[in-house]
Image (cartoon, helix red, strand yellow):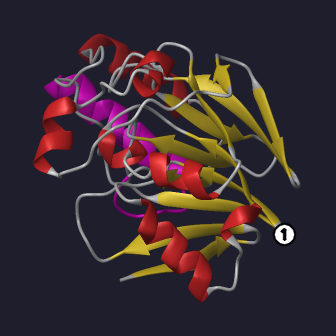
Amino acid sequence: MSDLIEIKPKIQMLRVSESFTSNVYLIGQDTYLVIDTGLNAHYLTDAMQKSNIPVENLEKIVLTHSHIDHIGGLNKLVECTSADISIHEYESRYVEEGDMSATAAEIFSIQLQRTPITSTLKEGDIIEWDEFHFKVLHTPGHTCGSICLYEENKHILFSGDTVFANGGFGRTDLPPGGNNEDLINSLKRLADLDIGLLAPGHMDVVNNGQLHIKKSYEVARIYL
């Protein structure tokens, strides 16, 4: 089962009953930007149908990194939409060559296909969508090309697997390019931002995001 729940005006989160899939965020009104696709596209397309949102109105997909629980639904979404696809420049080849997380793909019976990236992202890029202005923050550590999207005026951070609520953060022992020191530095940087809503790649969306990130940074300094 999957449903869309509104967490802020023009921001909806995909709630999925199955466990191994990332959070997916649908942003906009009439036309939509999606942050990550989750493991399977049908989670999102089924929820959009329930909410009377035409899937063809999905016009842009931003991937926070190239792990399969975040990109597994990409191929099917590309088949049913003409959405632009963006990911950090360090990880674009894993999507385009279809070779990321091969072991996980076998376990979950998902065949990753080669998917052309429309545009690559880098630190400081701005993604304008509806009333939102998302700044791309390159936050390596979980992977080499992990990104967060920061809406400075609205104090919102979409953090992928860089940081979670309640002191959590992404693991650093997976390809491509997981690194303890990089993650600690990324968390330190995020802890200095003015963040109200923290919308991570897994688990709960929370308010008082800056406090949660500061806790994650302190925990990472001790255990990584």
Q: Is 74 or 127 nearer to us in this picture?
A: 74
Q: Pinpoint residue 28: horizontal percent, then vertical percent.
A: 78, 62
82 lies above or below 15: above
**What residue did someone put label 1 on?**
30
Looking at the rendered image, the quarter that the N terminus falls into is bottom left
Q: Pinpoint residue 170: horizontal percent, then vertical percent.
A: 29, 36
Looking at the rendered image, the quarter that the C terminus falls into is top left
* Residue 131 placement, left or right of 70: right
Q: Pinpoint residue 92: horizontal percent, then vertical percent.
A: 50, 20
Dividing the picture into quadrants, the one containing residue 81 is: bottom right
| Disc 1 element | loop
Q: Is 196 or 61 nearer to us in this picture?
A: 61
Residue interval drawn in magenta: 202-224
Inspect the magenta stretch and tell me whether residue 204 lies in it.
yes
* Residue 161 placement, left or right of 106: right
In terms of secondary structure, what is the magenta stretch mainly? helix
Q: Is 88 or 57 nearer to us in this picture?
A: 57
Dividing the picture into quadrants, the one containing residue 48 is: bottom right
142 lies above or below 213: above
Q: Residue at x 31, y 57 (%)?
A: 21
Inspect the magenta stretch and tell me whether residue 132 lies in it.
no
Q: Residue at x 79, y 29 (%)?
A: 126
The amino acid pointed to by label 1 is Asp
Q: Residue at x 31, y 32 (%)?
A: 218
Q: Residues within 10 Å of mark 1 (few under 14, many from 20)?
A: few
50 lies above or below 209: below
Count of labels shown? 1
Q: Pinpoint residue 194: horizontal percent, then vertical percent.
A: 66, 41
